[in-house]
């Protein structure tokens, strides 16, 4: 029997043992989850066999903080061996060692039980055995030793996400409605980022909706000046379009939602391989090296997040949500230094940064202009955006992005070519860099460029003032 066949048999035996209990639990849960004011959940079914998994994630999201977690079986989430809690200031190495020791402990117990021994068990061995269905096979317990996992708690982050969601929730639902996407998906940022618009993952995903750069480029601007993944407005539009397209291709919202984590192509392969779009079958039977724990649990964790979001007071008690964002947009007609926008709006630098998260550090340091056409957000109290734009002087508007003050000469590059590209003249470059002839320009040399002129400035180029001989080190041969 292959590992895949053994896994399928193991899951089948477990489902048979749990299905009656799950059906009972599901009927109770369905009544508790009902919300007359909320839209139907028919787009996101909760099959009885997935009920224990949803309950597991509800516990992670509402019952265990990031100062602890659960040691559990990674295929049968109803099997939780232990909850571990740590002091907030525990050393990370101590924490990691304690988690490894706990996992090793349960692996040893499972292997011992897997030998068939049922008599003369310790209290801990009896407790672990009782977590599994009566009559569980020795092979199942042996295999379970390979599936002991630790899941970090998220309750404190989820609570913070519920508070942050007050700023964006109504906007997200509005965008989803406009795109023809179920409003329930407004709970998805709980799973992705806890509604943290500045969240970044270890693998490169960013923003409230956790777009990877390769996916984001289809809908969003991502470069060294602007990263729209960090913009709650732009990224929400992109997420709605992605989900609508995934549903169009897959024909099922559970599969489309899973595709948000695993990719549309991956879910198309799963659907084709299994010959079904039944979410329970896909989650329990699909085998792929890339369809790991996170992908397999994405749908059930979303259902848990949706339940908590709808009934947050039952899980967390009264919460004070952040007020809805009421900022207004100034669409910039040209490239503008950020200090000019601070001047005309009268808004503090830190407040503008908080409202314009897509603008990256070079803009805030003044090394780059805020791009032409950028939808720059200001507090509603700052006034009418058109009036604010009218306060910008012609000497604060630029026709092109701010360039670097220096340029390195490339192979076979002439001074005339550099001057044409940078909007200046060869004569001005020679004067600025204290050179007497273009023949002195060589590959690797670093040249100073003239200061950029705003749109309203005179285009006459003043003669460069030369410093005393021997003081200039800007025009030099690269090492």
Image (cartoon, helix red, strand yellow):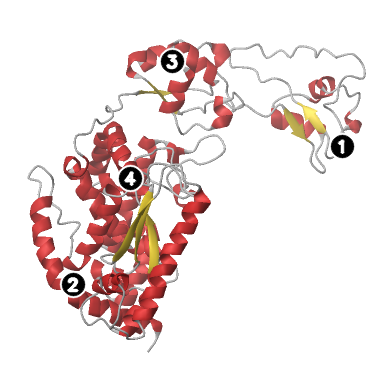
Q: Nearer the viewer, residue 128 or 185?
A: 128
Q: What kind of element bears circle 4?
A: helix
Question: Disc 2 or 3, which lies upstream in sequence?
Answer: 2
Q: Secondary structure at mark 1?
A: loop
Q: What label sits on residue 347 in the rendered view?
A: 3
Cα gap from disc 1 to disc 3, whole angstroms: 47 Å
At horizontal 66% and vertical 11% (from top left) the residue drawn is 458
Residue on which disc 4 sits: 189
Secondary structure of residue under mark 2: helix
User: Dots 1 and 4: beta carbons under 8 Å?
Assistant: no
458 is higher (above) or lower (below) than 372: above
Q: Which residue is mark 2?
A: 18
Asked if residue 240 shows in the view, the reply is no
Q: Which residue occupies 22% across, 82% down?
A: 135
Q: Position of residue 454 (x, y in %)?
A: 60, 17
Q: Residue at x 23, y 54 (%)?
A: 303
Between the C-alphas of marks 2 and 3, the distance is 59 Å
Comes first in the chain, label 1 or label 4: 4
Mark 1 to mark 4 CA distance (whole Å): 53 Å
Of the image marks 3 and 4, the number of the one nearer the N terminus: 4
Residue 357 visible somewhere in the drawing: yes
- Would you place residue 222 above or below residue 153 in this image? above
Which quarter shows the N terminus? Answer: bottom left
């Amino acid at each position: 029997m292959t590992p895949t066949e053994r896994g399928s048999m193991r899951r089948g035996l477990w489902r048979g043992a749990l299905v009656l209990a799950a059906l009972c639990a599901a009927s109770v849960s369905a009544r508790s989850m009902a919300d007359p004011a909320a839209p139907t959940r028919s787009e996101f079914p909760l099959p009885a066999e997935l009920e224990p998994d949803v309950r597991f994630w509800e516990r992670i999201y509402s019952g265990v903080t990031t100062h602890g977690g659960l040691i559990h079986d990674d295929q049968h989430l109803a099997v939780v061996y232990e909850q571990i809690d740590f002091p907030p200031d525990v050393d990370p190495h101590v924490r990691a060692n304690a988690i490894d020791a706990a996992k090793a402990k349960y692996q040893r117990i499972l292997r011992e039980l897997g030998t068939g021994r049922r008599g003369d068990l310790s209290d801990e061995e009896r407790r672990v055995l009782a977590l599994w269905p009566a009559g569980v096979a020795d092979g199942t317990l042996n295999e379970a030793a390979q599936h002991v996992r630790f899941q970090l708690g998220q309750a404190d982050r989820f609570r913070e996400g519920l508070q942050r969601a007050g700023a964006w929730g109504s906007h997200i639902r509005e965008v989803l409605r406009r795109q023809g996407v179920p409003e329930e998906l407004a709970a998805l940022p709980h799973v992705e980022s806890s509604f943290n618009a500045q969240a970044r993952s270890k693998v490169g995903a960013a923003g409230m909706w956790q777009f990877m750069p390769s996916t984001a480029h289809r809908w969003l601007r991502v470069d060294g000046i602007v990263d729209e993944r960090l913009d709650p407005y732009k990224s929400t539009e992109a997420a709605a379009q992605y989900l609508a397209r995934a549903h169009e291709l897959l024909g099922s919202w559970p599969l489309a939602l899973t595709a948000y984590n695993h990719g549309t192509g991956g879910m198309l392969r799963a659907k084709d391989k299994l010959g079904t779009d039944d979410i329970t079958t896909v989650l329990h039977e699909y085998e792929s090296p890339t369809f790991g724990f996170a992908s397999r649990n994405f749908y059930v964790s979303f259902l848990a997040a949706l339940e908590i979001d709808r009934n947050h007071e039952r899980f967390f008690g009264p919460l004070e949500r952040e007020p809805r964002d009421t900022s207004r947009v100034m669409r910039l007609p040209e490239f503008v230094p950020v200090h000019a926008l601070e001047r005309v709006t009268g808004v503090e630098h830190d407040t503008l940064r908080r409202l314009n998260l897509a603008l990256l550090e070079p803009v805030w340091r003044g090394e780059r202009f805020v791009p032409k056409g950028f939808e720059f957000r200001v507090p509603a109290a700052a006034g009418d955006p058109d009036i604010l734009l009218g306060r910008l002087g012609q000497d604060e508007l630029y026709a092109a992005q701010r360039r670097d003050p220096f340029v390195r000469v490339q192979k076979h590059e002439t001074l005339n070519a550099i001057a044409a590209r940078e909007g200046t003249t060869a004569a001005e470059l020679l004067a600025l860099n204290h050179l007497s002839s273009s023949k002195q320009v060589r590959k690797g040399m670093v040249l100073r460029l003239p200061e950029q002129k705003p749109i309203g400035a005179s285009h006459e180029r003043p003669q460069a003032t030369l410093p005393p001989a021997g003081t200039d080190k800007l025009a030099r041969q690269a090492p």
